[in-house]
Each structure stands twice: as C-alpha cells, then as structure tokens.
Amino acid sequence: MKKLICMLLVMVMVLMPMSAFADTYTGMRTEKTEDKTPSARQGIYVEDYYEYNMPYVIKVDRTNQLVSIYEESSPGCYDILALRAICSTGTKKDPTPKGMFTLSDASRREWRYFKTYKTYVRYGVHIQDGYFFHSLLYSKKDLSTMSKTSYKKLGSPASHGCIRMLDDDIKWMFEKCLAGTRVYVMDCEKDKELHDQYMPEPLK
C-alpha cells in the first residue's frame, strides 16, 4: 500500500510541472500566432527608429477612411496626434495599396493636372508611382470649380488609388511632411464613432 502511495505521489510531482509548462507554451503560441487588427486610434511604432529622423509618420486607415499624422513621444513611438483627417482612398476596383511607403522628393506645387482623368487637384504630395495625397477634384484652376461629388464621397472609398483630403488638411501635410516621411497604409478595426467625428459638414 505504501509503495502504491509513493508511486502516485511521484507521478503527481512529475505531471504537474509538465501540465504547467504545456499551458504556458500554449499561451505563448497563441499570443505569437494571433492576428490582431490594429486600432484606428493607435499610433505607429517605428522599429528601426535609429535610422529614421523625420518628425512625423503618416497612417492611412482604409477601413475608417482616416489619415492620422503622428509625432514621436519616445524613441520609435509615434503616438502624439498632430493631425487627423477624413479621406477617400481607392475603390475596391482600384485600391490604395497596403504597406509602408516613403514620400518622394517629387516637386510640390499648389495645382497639379492629372491628364488621364482630366482633373486638377491641389497640394499633391507624391507617395509612389501614380499614387498621391491630394485635395478634392477641380475642373479648372479655380476654387469655385470643386467637384461636389468628390466632397460628398469623403469618408468612403472613391478614388483610383490616390488619397483625397480636404484642402486645409492636405495643405498642412504639404507644408509639414517632407520627402522621406514614412506612410503606413493599413486596415484597422472599424470605429464608426471616430469616422463620424471627422466627417465634414454637408454641402448646402
């Protein structure tokens, strides 16, 4: 009987640590493999911050149609909101590509003409290839010719891949975010409250 009890005690002592280790390992695996969608409100962590010396990073949230520009609070942690603005990214047919990009040193000017679409935009900021941040659309170099349709579609995908913003918002980016600034285009958790907070007033 004593021998049986001793054997049982040994088994318990051996199995308990194994179970504990198994639980810990499972938890670690789950944490590593879990695919967490980022919050629309969180900033950006720049892992190679020691190589990045720009004052801002730009986050484009395709889900909530928002552009957020952050300043650095501590090394690599860009979470001080400098500007947040409603936007229109590309449609499902012509999406704005996801990923990390760097603003180019292409010349900036107040007006730019897109010949393919026969439209003018203001404050174009070149991202890559044919993709820009820019204002709403205009038929001429005249503020009175702004496309009401492009205004009404703000807050929803509407472009051919560029990122449209209100004139005041893109002007701020145009002046502050210089060539070399990083752009992170991503999909975030849906946040209707935040989206609605930045929607412009309806046109009269």
Image: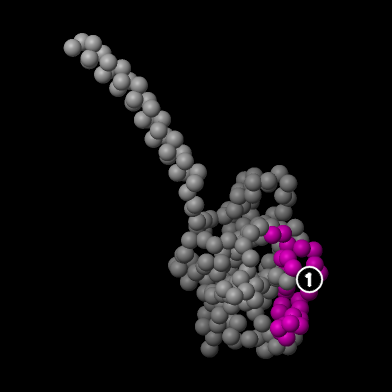
Crowd tier of the residue under label 1, counting other residues whose Cα lies within 10 Å: few below 14, some 14–19, many 20 or above = some
Residue depicted at 51% across the width and 83% down the height? 202
Residue depicted at 50% across the width and 43% down the height? 32
Q: Which residue lies under the disc numbered 1?
A: 108
Give, as a three-letter code, the residue at label 1. Answer: Arg
In the picture, measured across the screen, residue 181 lies left or right of residue 29, that is right
Q: Residue furthest top?
A: 2
Residue 128 sits inside the magenta stretch:
yes
Q: Quadrant of residue 17?
A: top left
Residue depicted at 52% across the width and 71% down the height? 198
Residue depicted at 53% across the width and 88% down the height? 204
Residue 155 sits inside the magenta stretch:
no
Kindly state the secondary structure of the residue where label 1 is placed. loop
Q: Position of residue 174 (x, y in %)?
A: 72, 68
Q: Position of residue 107 (x, y in %)?
A: 81, 69
Query: Closer to the camera, 195 or 160?
Result: 160
Position of residue 77 relative to residue 127, above or below, is: above
Query: Magenta region: which residues?
Result: 101-129
Q: Position of residue 54 (x, y in %)?
A: 72, 54
The color scheme shown is one colour
Q: Is residue 41 visible?
A: yes
Position of residue 195 relative to residue 45, above or below, is: below
Tell me the quadrant of the picture where the N terminus can be found. Answer: top left
Q: Is residue 143 visible?
A: no
Query: Closer to the camera, 7 or 21?
Result: 7
In the picture, measured across the screen, residue 182 lies left or right of residue 84, that is right
Query: Closer to the camera, 22 or 136?
Result: 22
Q: Position of residue 145 (x, y in %)?
A: 67, 89
Position of residue 95 relative to residue 55, above or below, is: below
Query: Closer to the camera, 71 or 139?
Result: 139
